[in-house]
Image: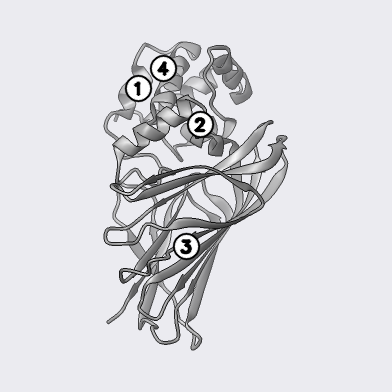
Amino acid sequence: MTATFHETLHLAIEHSGLSLENIQRRLMDRKITVSLASLSYWRRGRTRPERRTSLAAVAALEDILALPDGSLRRLLGKAPHPLGQEWAMRSSSFEERLEWKLATAELRAETNNALAAVSVEADLHLGPDRQQVRMVNRRLLMSLADGIDRYVTRYAAEPGEELPVLGEVIGATTGEQLRDLDRQVNSAELRFDRPLPAGETLHLQWTWEFPLGVGTSNVSRTVLSAGARTMGYRLFFHPDAIPPRCHRTWRPSLAVPEERVAELRIGARGSTHYLLTDAGAGWHGAVWDWV
């Protein structure tokens, strides 16, 4: 059986005797920036490189680890999209535009690779017409490198769902935004008050608002690119529109279908929640039935 990308990378690193820190420095010598978290996740198979900047790093890794040219890149093949790209199922062209912004330092999405999620919380509020009203997101983040100064958040709307606008932000200021109405994706920079040193934590909160109040909603998802120590998901239904059934959902990658893993009991006041510890990377969420 042919070894996978992460298995081959792991064995090559072991054989080289280089630490991830040494590998990162050698990449930086080539003007290629990859966070230690990304290298670790690639090595363990938790994420896979796909962006052009990441593929350039893979090519450099082949040389640094004394591997035949193309040996790692061939193993990537046509594998599923990596985790952590919330628009991956919807728009490669939007991703290319975002990559151009990244290349010109106008919207640096790769900054998130140097931030570890300690805790993740999502609160979704729905209205009397079964529509989404707002989604409040909270993150306790830890910087994995010196000088990290922003976080990039994205929202990819479901088919028929209203594309929200960014509302209140706590713990940062709003930077540049990219709103693609054709592909129903919204991205925004949350800029910190100052660059974070490695090891420092920061609590962020931001709200996606649905001002038009159109469409009936029956699903909500949050993407974790690299997992989190804890993850809390809360749903607040309007007292006049409480669904009879609700389930927690989980999808570790695009290669497998979404699974309803547990039923969530909705209380008399119309709310329900779940809490996960050591939440894995992937698509976490909830789905509910109106009939």
* Tags 4 and 3 touching, CB below 8 Å: no
Task: For the C terminus, give its image quadrant.
Answer: bottom left
Q: Which residue is mark 4?
A: 59
Residue beneath the point at 39% across and 39% down: 82
Q: Which mark is residue 73?
A: 1
Q: Is residue 18 visible?
A: no
12 or 92, nearer to the observer: 92
Of mark 1 and mark 2, the one earlier in the sequence is 1
Q: Which residue is mark 2?
A: 106
Is 244 rendered above or below residue 168? below
Residue beneath the point at 44% across and 69% down: 133
The picture places residue 14, in percent across and down from the top left corner, at 53, 22
Q: Which mark is residue 209?
A: 3
Is 237 rendered above or below residue 220? below
Kindly state the secondary structure of the residue where label 2 is placed. Answer: loop
Q: Quadrant of residue 54?
A: top left
Of mark 1 and mark 3, the one earlier in the sequence is 1
The picture places residue 276, in percent across and down from the top left corner, at 54, 62
Kind of residue at disc 3:
Glu
Of mark 4 and mark 1, the one earlier in the sequence is 4
Of the residues tagged 4 and 3, which is closer to the observer? 3
* Tags 4 and 2 touching, CB below 8 Å: no
Q: Quadrant of residue 71?
A: top left
- The answer to whether 99 appears left or right of 152 in the picture is left
Of the residues tagged 1 and 2, which is closer to the observer? 2
Kindly state the secondary structure of the residue where label 3 is placed. Answer: strand
Distance in Å between CA atoms under marks 4 and 2: 25 Å
Of the residues tagged 1 and 3, which is closer to the observer? 3
